[in-house]
Image (cartoon, rainbow, N blue to C red):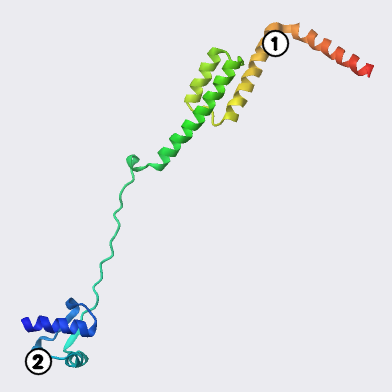
Amino acid sequence: MNNLTNKKLLASKVLGVGKKRICFDVDRLNEIKEAITKQDIKDLFSEGFITIRPIGGRKAVHKRNRRRGLGKIHMKVRTRKQDYVKITRKLRKHLKGLKNIGEISNEDFWKIRKKVRMRYFKSKANLVEYLQNEKKIIREKTSEKEGNKSQPVKKERAKKIKEIKEKK
C-alpha cells in the first residue's frame, strides 16, 4: 500500500494534477508497482492504466430567500428621519423669526408649530404660502367686521391718485 501512495505522488507530479484525482486500474496494480521513472508513468497513462478523475467542483449554492422585515430596513428609515429633522428645524426657525418680528401672534405660532410637527408642510415655501393665505383670510374677516369703513378710505385714495396724475 505504501508503494501506491508514492506512485500517486509521482503520477500527480508528472501529469500535473492533484493526488486525489489520480485513479489506478485495479487489474493492473502489479504493473503500476513496477513503474519507477516518469516515463513509465507516462506510458501507463497513455495505455489507460492510470486515469485522471474529472474536476468535481462545488455544487451551485442556492441563496436562501430571507424575508426582509421592518427590522432589517435601515437606509430608508435613516433618510426619512434626516429629511424630517432638516425640514422641521428650518420651519421652526422661520416661525420663531416671524414671531419675534411680530407678524404672528403667540397662539398662531403654537398652532402652526403643531402642524409642523405633524408634517403638514412639505417645505418652507409651502409654509409661507399657507401663512399668506391665512393672512388673507384674517384680513377678509376684519374687513367684514368693519363693513363700509374700508370703502370710503379706498375711494379717498383713488381720488388722491387721480389728482396726482392730473397735476403731472
Residue 130 placement: quadrant: top right
Q: Residue furthest left?
A: 1
Left/right placement of residue 93 relative to residue 19 reads: right
Specify the label residue 34 is tagged with: 2
Q: Residue furthest right?
A: 167
**The C terminus lies in quadrant:** top right
In the image, is residue 159 above or below residue 54? above
**Residue tagged by mark 1?**
143
Q: Are marks 1 and 2 in contact (CB under 8 Å)?
A: no
**The N terminus lies in quadrant:** bottom left
What amino acid type is highlighted by mark number 1? Ser
Question: Which of the pair 34/144 is nearer the observer?
Answer: 34
Q: Residue furthest front?
A: 37
At mark 1, the secondary structure is helix
In the image, is residue 90 above or below residue 39? above
Q: Percent from the top left, x then y, of residue 41?
A: 17, 90
The CA distance from mark 1 to mark 2 is: 120 Å
Left/right placement of residue 73 relative to residue 59 reads: right
In the image, is residue 9 above or below residue 145? below
Q: Residue at x 17, y 78 (%)?
A: 19
Question: Which of the pair 147/62 is nearer the observer?
Answer: 62
Q: Percent from the top left, x then y, of residue 159?
A: 87, 12
In the image, is residue 111 above or below residue 126? above
Residue 75 placement: quadrant: top left
